[in-house]
């Protein structure tokens, strides 16, 4: 159903006034005791998710487990589902479906988020020895600030596929008693030429992000590189991984340790990969809470967003069409190409991704009027992209009006923001790839401090309000 019909409704002046009045009001001010208890218990659950889901595969596995327990079934070949279903691809991309009262050909309510985050991958050939130390060569994944990854505890998570079809799951550096890995930095006494006198972009070359892996030589070995030999023995002993197997591995170097509460008041959450696992967490939780919605629901957790959405598990792939077809089929509808196209063109989506919060120490990059404040609810971002709206799939005015109405009617505290000042940089999401299919889409998500760093900071109140926003959006008729 086109949104035009719903927008015929006369504007609710009281809602409009509230919207203006609440613009700069902190969510904390509106919480009663039971609201605060909800915020805290949700924050605990969310921190646990961040601690246990440090790769896109782990995200996918944890969600699959959770929704299976919730009565969801594999959509493949189903002509009906009761509670809901999923479509998984390559262990990293996940689509979820909940049938609604309305005909799915008339469109879905869709939330898309992404489960991948900036990190360091190991190169296919990565093991070497130098200066009596065993090292692993890494490869950047996504837009990270390289210096933030030096001289801090790191863990390794991942997956190795063997030629015979077996695989090994790797996870090291997370358990309280585990040793960790690290990437070394040069001492300030000697950094003048290699770092201090260089531009930031040149001072930290990617090829210097080598992971310190071991130091004890292999006793009794006749090899020249005895520390490397010891490292290979460890890999084989722990996970059965031989040097050549690293070529068919996906091993990721991520910050070690659990997500934490931040601030004397514990009002914030600090942890790795809140971009975009905050929205993964909220969208799946909101979907699981949706029973018998009016419109049928979809949630997609994409992979590879941080590197441009390319690849079979990214949003550039045709997965959304396959998911829509599977959802149509599971609703007893003909999953024809025409029905898929019609359904997607009538679909409304939130591209649920995190935003930049105003950092008081770097205020000059923001346009005051259009910037997001911590603790003030999810940011609705009409367009992303670079200067001149380049690369943006701007949400049209009628769709912005619909989103305003959905959130205001559900008493969701939210903010209208843009990423930053026009010529400071820019960024994108998967919104334009949804829009390609005719989907009405707008970016929406809580704002973070230190985005893309190993320790991103969110507001507990925003996490809670974001869940409320997702529930309101999914429930909208
Ligand atoms: Mn993101
Ligand atoms: Mn990002």
Image (cartoon, helix red, strand yellow):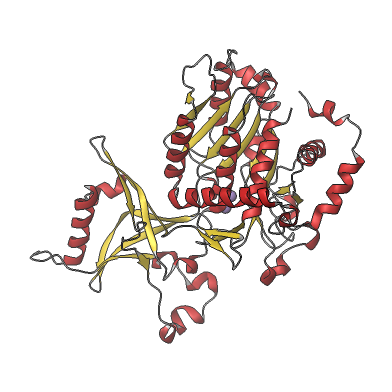
Does residue 188 appear to the left or right of 417 in the view shown? left
Q: Residue at x 21, y 47 (%)?
A: 240
Give residue 135's quadrant in the image: bottom left
Is residue 332 visible to us here? yes
Residue sitting nearer the eye, 125 or 442: 442
Residue sitting nearer the eye, 173 or 184: 173
Does residue 455 appear to the left or right of 34 in the view shown? left
The N terminus lies in quadrant = top right
Q: Residue at x 68, y 59 (%)?
A: 374
The C terminus lies in quadrant = top right
Does residue 239 appear to the left or right of 70 in the view shown? left
Q: Residue at x 37, y 51 (%)?
A: 157
Residue sitting nearer the eye, 413 or 123: 413
Relative image position of residue 134 (x, y in whole percent): 26, 66
Q: Residue at x 50, y 81 (%)?
A: 196
Examine the rendered structure and indicate whether residue 229 appears above or below residue 392: below
Is residue 307 visible to us here? no
């Amino acid at each position: 159903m086109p949104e035009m019909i719903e927008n015929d409704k006369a504007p609710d002046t009281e809602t409009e006034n509230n919207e203006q009045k609440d613009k700069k009001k902190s969510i904390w001010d509106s919480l009663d005791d039971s609201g605060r208890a909800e915020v805290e218990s949700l924050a605990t659950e969310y921190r646990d998710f961040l601690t246990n889901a440090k790769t896109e595969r782990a995200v996918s596995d944890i969600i699959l487990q959770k929704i299976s327990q919730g009565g969801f079934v594999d959509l493949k070949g189903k002509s009906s589902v009761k509670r809901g279903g999923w479509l998984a691809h390559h262990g990293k991309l996940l689509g979820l479906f909940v049938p609604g009262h309305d005909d799915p050909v008339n469109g879905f309510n869709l939330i898309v988020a992404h489960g991948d985050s900036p990190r360091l991958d190991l190169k296919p050939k990565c093991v070497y020895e130098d200066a009596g130390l065993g090292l692993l060569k890494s490869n950047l994944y996504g837009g990270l600030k390289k210096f933030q990854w030096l001289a801090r505890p790191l863990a390794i998570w991942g997956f190795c596929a063997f030629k015979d079809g077996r695989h090994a799951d790797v996870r090291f550096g997370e358990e309280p008693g585990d040793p960790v890995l690290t990437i070394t930095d040069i001492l300030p006494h000697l950094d003048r030429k290699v770092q201090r006198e260089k531009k930031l972009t040149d001072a930290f070359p990617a090829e210097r992000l080598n992971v310190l892996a071991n130091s004890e030589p292999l006793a009794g070995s006749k090899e020249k590189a005895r520390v490397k030999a010891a490292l290979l023995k460890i890999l084989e002993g722990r996970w059965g991984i031989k040097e050549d197997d690293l070529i068919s591995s996906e091993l990721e170097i991520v910050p070690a340790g659990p997500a934490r509460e931040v601030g004397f008041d514990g009002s914030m959450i600090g942890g790795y990969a809140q971009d975009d696992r905050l929205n993964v967490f909220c969208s799946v939780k909101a979907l699981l809470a949706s029973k018998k919605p009016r419109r049928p629901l979809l949630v997609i957790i994409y992979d590879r967003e941080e590197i441009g959405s390319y690849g079979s598990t990214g949003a550039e792939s045709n997965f959304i069409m396959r998911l829509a077809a599977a959802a149509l089929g599971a609703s007893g509808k003909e999953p024809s190409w025409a029905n898929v196209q019609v359904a997607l063109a009538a679909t409304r989506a939130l591209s649920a991704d995190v935003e930049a919060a105003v950092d008081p120490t770097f205020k000059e990059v923001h346009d005051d009027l259009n910037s997001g404040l911590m603790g003030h609810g999810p940011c609705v971002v009409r367009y992303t992209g670079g200067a001149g709206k380049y690369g943006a799939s701007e949400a049209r005015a009628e769709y912005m009006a619909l989103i305003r109405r959905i959130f205001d009617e559900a008493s969701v505290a939210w903010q209208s923001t843009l990423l930053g000042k026009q010529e400071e940089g820019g960024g994108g999401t998967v919104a334009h790839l949804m829009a390609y299919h005719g989907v009405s889409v707008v970016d929406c998500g809580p704002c973070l401090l230190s985005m893309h760093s190993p320790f991103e900071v969110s507001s507990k109140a925003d996490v809670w309000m974001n869940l409320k926003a997702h529930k309101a959006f999914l429930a909208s008729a």
